[in-house]
Image: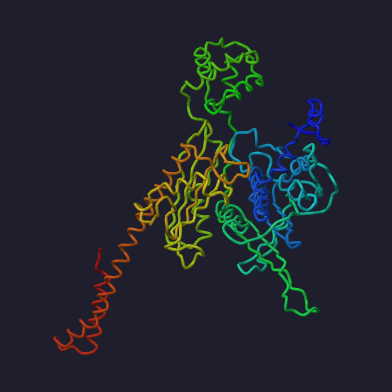
Amino acid sequence: MAKRNGGGPATAESMASKQRDISVSEFFLKNRHLLGFDSPRRALLTAVKEAVDNSLDACEEGGILPEIAVELEQTAETRFRVTITDNGPGIVKNQIPKIFAKLLYGSKFHRLRMSRGQQGIGISAAGMYGQLTTGAATRILSRIKGAQVAHAMSVQIDTRQNKPAILSDTEQDWLPTFLPVNAEGQPEGDPVVSRHGTSVSIEMEAAYQRGRQSVDEFVKQCAIVNPHLSLHYRMTLITKADPKAKADATPAAPATVCVTYHRAIKLMPKIPDEILPHPHGVELGMLMQMLKDTESRTVRSALSSDFSRVSAQTALDICERAGIEPKTNPTRIAHQQSEALYKAIQGTKLMRPPTDCLSPIGEAQILAGLQKELRADFFTAVTREPAVYRGNPFQIEIGLAYARPQENEGLGNEEPVRVMRFANRVPLLYQGGACAMTKAVVGVNWKSYGLAQPKDALPLGPVVMLVHMASVWVPFTSESKDAIAGYAEIIDELTLGLQECGRRLSVFLHKRHHELEAARKRSYIEMYIPHLALGLKDILQLSDKEEDKVVTDLKKMLEKTHLDV
């Protein structure tokens, strides 16, 4: 039984007085682990990921080849300032506070087309995490095309009301500027200056650590899966002072790492079209809500105008199967009629939804991205035909590289293959074991394609696998968007794509084995050529010059000889 502060039992009235609304901001503030802010290390990666996703989406929608700078600056032992700058179209002034300081606000949630962001949570959640851990506001600079100045704002989230609070709003002369660097981190060429773009800066409690789940790996994988992107990465760490140093010694300088991932191609991805919901992907409750909200005056016209792949004749057939008068006002459909309509829709054979809402990377672009960052002897890529799960179109792409272990860190014949997972061109670095992509890789019999594979585990070998899912709605297992749910249709498509790459890998390995075996046999014969020439010299009484000619002729004959296994 509930107790009051005084110790006595609570009453219905006292309990009612304590009830209040909970805003979405408050909920995620207390459950930030759901959004990928469960540790300082992961928080740093999540903040970078969300900002880069927004920048890439904005550039591509604006038809602009993306130029993005990622800057991490350590300001204290457990604090970092994360700054992401892009050359996108910029953001109009009145939208800045809502985009960066209001959860569940955006243009992507209600539309059915492929995009990196989906929920309208990411970048505002990063700002909220920074606000929670450091008390600092999110600072935004944005300049739209044709503007004379940029808008500079500092904003925070009012978590009680999920509303933005504007702390400062000024104008300043600012242009996004990007400085390319070479492999040694030195300036390379002239700075790239854009007349428009956006920069967001968030200070937060965070930790940096190298490895497969680091910001370093994220930006590298971004460059691979977005070959049209030019990405400038700069990180400045505070180096710890030497405890043996003298008290008056000069403090250690910050350690700075700079790298530019140059674009491999100048071809922009196709801008996907927005599509209507497919009837087979709509559940009963959603159908009822759509009938209430429709602008159509009849059930028949609502079905044909609000859904994809439903013609006027098909809509008439559905109404007849459900026992509903086609001219009935959809807003007056009762629950029982809605259920009959839903069952009739599910029992009607319809064309698959259109796939122009997708923008796959493409086989040539996958190869360009892999070849740009990996040293390998074999590359291949497969883009599957579009498929559907729960009425949502999706497309699977697989890239595979057989790398040279001596030239690629972390790859070896006895090491598990490296699986790089992507959803709508975004790297997924956490929860690999829970992801349908990893499960699909493990489920393929790689022994039949020439790789060793322990039971129920990833295969072994110097192989990098790029696995990408493009969809209008990626079925993530949680709001942190780290793993994809294992729908049977998705697993099947992943498996088919992996098997096709496996067959091509098998041909390469088989051919290479033949070549190595032939080279081994030739080396044995070459070892005995001088002895053979010496024997011929004695038998035929040849001169030293003639002996040299015999050796040369024998080697030429060997080169023309086909030595099979």
Q: Residue at x 77, y 46 (%)?
A: 146
Q: From this viewpoint, is residue 196 visible? A: no
| Vertical order, 160 against 227 (above or below) | above
Question: Could you say where residue 522 lies in the image, as x and y percent from the top left?
Answer: 27, 72
For residue 371, side relative to residue 331 (left or right):
left
Q: From this viewpoint, is residue 453 visible? A: yes
Question: Which is more toward the observer, 323 or 60?
Answer: 323
Q: Residue at x 81, y 48 (%)?
A: 154
Question: Which is more toward the observer, 277 or 193?
Answer: 277
| Vertical order, 324 against 369 (above or below) | above
Q: Residue 341 occupies which quadrant of the picture?
A: top right
Question: Could you say where residue 2 lies in the image, as x and y percent from the top left?
Answer: 75, 32
User: Which quadrant, please, contains the N terminus?
Assistant: top right
Question: Could you say where residue 327 lies in the image, as x and y percent from the top left?
Answer: 59, 10
Q: Residue at x 58, y 29 (%)?
A: 276
Q: Residue 80 occupies which quadrant of the picture?
A: bottom right
